[in-house]
Image: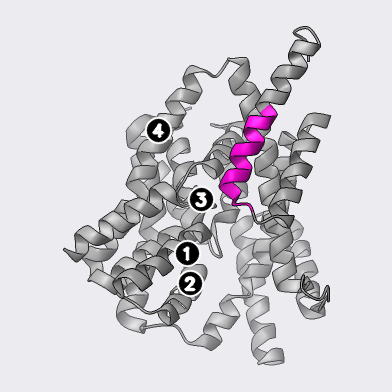
Amino acid sequence: MKISLKELFFIFFRISIVLIGGGYVLLPISINEFSKKRKILTQEEIIDFYALSQCLPGVIVVKTATFIGYHLRGKLGALFSLLGLITPPFIAIVAIGYYINGINPKILGIINTITIAVIVLVGASFIEMAEVCIKNLFTVFMFLLTVILFAFSNIQPVFIIIILSIFGVLYKNIMRRINGGKE
Amino acid sequence: MIYLQLAFEFIKISLFSFGGGYGTLPFIYYIANHYGWYSVKEIMHMVAISAVTPGAFGVNMATYTGFKTGGIIGSIITTLALIVPSFFLSIGVYKILKKYKNSIFMQDFLETLKAIASGLLFVVVLQMINQEILHFNFADLSVNFDIKSFIFLCFSIVIYFLVKKNIPLTMLITLIFGGILKYFLVL
């Protein structure tokens, strides 16, 4: 099933509207839109895109949207996805900048309660992601190593990702040689 | 001239910031100190507004910084400067990925990467819970458990399953109830 450029634009337009408090709800909502509702991408593909986006520089949401748009409809697909993604914040920010000149702190405090909902949604998307990504002893080990390094050291995330992925690939390669070509 | 500088700075952010939207903050501070287009105090204001308006945090920060510095044209320039390098980078990576999709090396790499990505996401969840509910302090190992936020979290989890994992509805209902509670009980 093909998806139209207009549809891509409006899907990312909608996604963008609910991206409040950081881009973390991107994963569950794009799995919902592209995999569960429309069945044009598998959950695994979306998680691949998201994982790749995390290790490239720049804003994660922008890269994931480019991957999804490009995968579905080529360069134009990526372009329309990105346009859909940047339109709502553009309108909102310009409107705030022009007319409101800053939001009342009391209202900000109320809107900030959304962070609690964000915790629930990120937690849920972590569980969905872990179900796909953590499936054997090796991945459990890599997962724990990442958590320990990320939570208890001052090493920058980018270096953790680089060092651990080199380590992981080397480890798998060596184990395969020791076991004579088998896992 | 200021437009060129804006474009240059945000292309830099796009190519060298890691860790998603919040990874752009050190660069935003650098711009404030280096060019003086806005003050560090204004950044706090921009962060608060970017976090609660629709859209990804990093994109919002770029749009807002551009608007503060160069009006509408400024915000168009910063937004584009932030996303165009990522656009080409992602398409390049996608092509490489597709070409070597079946190689063992690429499969190992993706398997490792996804385990790492799960770990990063898990730490984000921990940090959020700590920041909103637990308030664990590394310096003196004290915990300041926020019971109100915890009850609110449980409430939000129940809502999430009640609306059958519908994300916008979960956010909306939590926001409405949270707003009412906060307005009448806390403030």
Q: Check residue A162 for magenta coloring.
A: yes
> To which residue does mark 1 refer?
B25
Residue B18 numbered tag? 3
What sort of colour scheme is used for the picture? one colour
Mark closer to the chain start, 4 or 1: 1
Amino acid type at image mark 3: Phe
Which chain is indicated by disc 1? B
Q: Are marks 3 and 1 on the same chain?
A: yes
Above-or-below relation of A133 to A118:
above
Q: Examine the residues drawn in magenta and state their main secondary structure.
A: helix
* Mark 3 or 2: the one toward you: 3
Amino acid type at image mark 4: Ile
Badge 3 vs badge 1, beta-carbon distance below 8 Å: no
> To which residue does mark 2 refer?
B47
Q: Are marks 4 and 1 on the same chain?
A: yes
Marks 4 and 1, how far apart in space? 25 Å
